[in-house]
């Protein structure tokens, strides 16, 4: 049963916050099942972190359901240039988000159910959570062959991944979140999660590609609501709480004081790109010159999402060394992204380049470099 989660309801359910919170005064007696009414990835990730930071979960576990409009979500220690096709995401209007937990990259849309299990650190148990989901799926459709793996994924028919896992473990509180793939555009998913960028060297956590299949392909009668209700019922039975799914609005400051600042932080370039572990790009490309191909070499070091060192090498007879040096020095300190590269190079060639031929070659190099960002 869905119940709107009013301020008064919160007053009856929450207590023992680590910071003052006007919307929460009393107790969560045995636990809660929540569902976000938002489909915004940043708002939903923010409410996860808000609960982690502010709720005392001692003997009061929480299960949160949430779904997002099309988004790619990378792990805390991942490199987005290695994990996804950023150009295609910009073209399709797919959001990029970096979560606070580890793990690999996932694609979210409305055909994917996200589940977050909040507990104390002592009670944290990913395998038990996954077994709970399996029991719920079997209750809806006993013929489904779904099993958890040692990597804490869920496999359908022993080969198709329908759920991936990530977690955040704090000093006393932990959460485990996982996906549940109901239906999706598999062609788009695979395209978005395949990086076209070459020559990247990084120690960032790398995702492991997997075959995927939505549960709807196995049983067309399933719906997101059926799956959500089944998991909620199993969770309620397991934790001896009432089987009510309480609706929450993760933008409501009366319920979650300070949450909008959390959501804004998750949308910043500094967090999404700037938190990428240091990496380098060592690549090259060819340009046509007098019916022959010339090689242009590019070596870039990126730290905190900004270009730390840059070395573009082109044959001197094609592009003078001083022009390459000017380009190299101009890039240093700028964001490793196509938009900033366009701005920087346009300003520079408008003020420094008078030769039309050199200007044209400059543009060729800059367009090629933007293609690796």
Image (cartoon, helix red, strand yellow):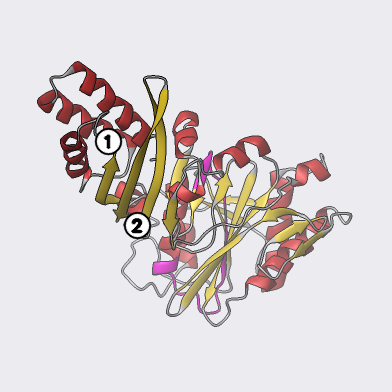
Residue 263 versus residue 239: which sits nearer the camera? 263
Quadrant of the rendered structure where residue 245 is? Answer: bottom right
Instruction: Classify 166 as above or below 123.
Output: above
- Residue 240 seen in the figure: no
Residue located at (68% from left, 59% from top)? 232
**Does 204 appear in magenta?**
no
Residue highlighted by disc 2: 275
In the picture as drawn, the residue positioned furthest to the top comes out as 356
In the picture as drawn, the residue positioned furthest to the right comes out as 143
Secondary structure of the residue carrying numbered label 2: loop
Residue highlighted by disc 1: 341
Residue located at (53% from left, 67% from top)? 167
**Does 63 appear in magenta?**
yes
Residue located at (59% from left, 38% from top)? 191
User: Image check: 213 left or right of 188?
Assistant: right
Residue 115 versus residue 29: which sits nearer the camera? 115
The residue stretch that appears in magenta: 52-72
Instruction: Classify 350 as above or below 95.
Output: above
User: Image check: 40 left or right of 109?
Assistant: left
User: Image check: 228 left or right of 22?
Assistant: right
């Amino acid at each position: 049963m869905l119940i709107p989660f009013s301020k008064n309801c919160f007053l009856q359910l929450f207590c023992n916050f680590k910071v003052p919170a006007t919307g929460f005064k009393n107790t969560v007696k045995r636990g809660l099942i929540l569902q976000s009414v938002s489909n915004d990835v940043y708002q939903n990730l923010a409410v996860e972190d808000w609960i982690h930071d502010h709720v005392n979960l001692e003997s009061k576990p929480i299960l949160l359901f949430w779904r997002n409009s099309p988004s790619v979500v990378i792990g805390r220690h991942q490199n987005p240039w290695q994990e996804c096709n950023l150009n295609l995401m910009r073209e399709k209007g797919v959001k990029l988000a970096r979560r606070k937990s580890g793990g690999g990259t996932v694609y979210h849309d409305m055909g994917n159910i996200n589940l977050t299990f909040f507990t104390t650190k002592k009670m944290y148990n990913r395998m038990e959570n996954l077994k709970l989901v399996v029991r719920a799926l079997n209750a809806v459709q006993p013929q489904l062959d779904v099993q958890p793996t040692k990597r804490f994924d869920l496999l359908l028919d022993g080969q198709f991944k329908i759920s991936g896992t990530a977690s955040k473990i704090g000093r006393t509180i932990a959460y485990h979140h996982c996906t549940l793939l109901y239906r999706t555009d598999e062609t788009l998913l695979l395209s978005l999660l395949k990086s076209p960028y070459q020559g990247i060297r990084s120690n960032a956590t790398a995702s492991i590609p997997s075959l995927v299949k939505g549960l709807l392909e196995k049983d067309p009668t399933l719906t997101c609501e059926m799956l959500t209700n089944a998991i909620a019922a199993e969770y309620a039975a397991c934790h001896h709480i009432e089987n009510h799914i309480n609706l929450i609005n993760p933008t409501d400051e009366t319920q979650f004081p300070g949450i909008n600042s959390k959501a804004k932080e998750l949308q910043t370039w500094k967090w999404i790109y700037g938190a990428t572990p240091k990496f380098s790009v060592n690549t090259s490309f060819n340009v046509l010159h007098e019916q022959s191909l010339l090689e242009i070499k590019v070596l870039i070091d990126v730290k905190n999402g900004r270009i730390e060192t840059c070395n573009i090498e082109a044959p001197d007879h094609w592009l003078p060394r001083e022009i390459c040096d000017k380009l190299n020095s101009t890039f240093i300190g700028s964001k490793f992204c196509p938009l900033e590269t366009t701005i920087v190079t346009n300003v520079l060639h408008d003020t420094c380049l008078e030769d039309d031929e050199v200007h044209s070659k400059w543009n060729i190099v800059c367009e090629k470099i933007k293609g690796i960002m």
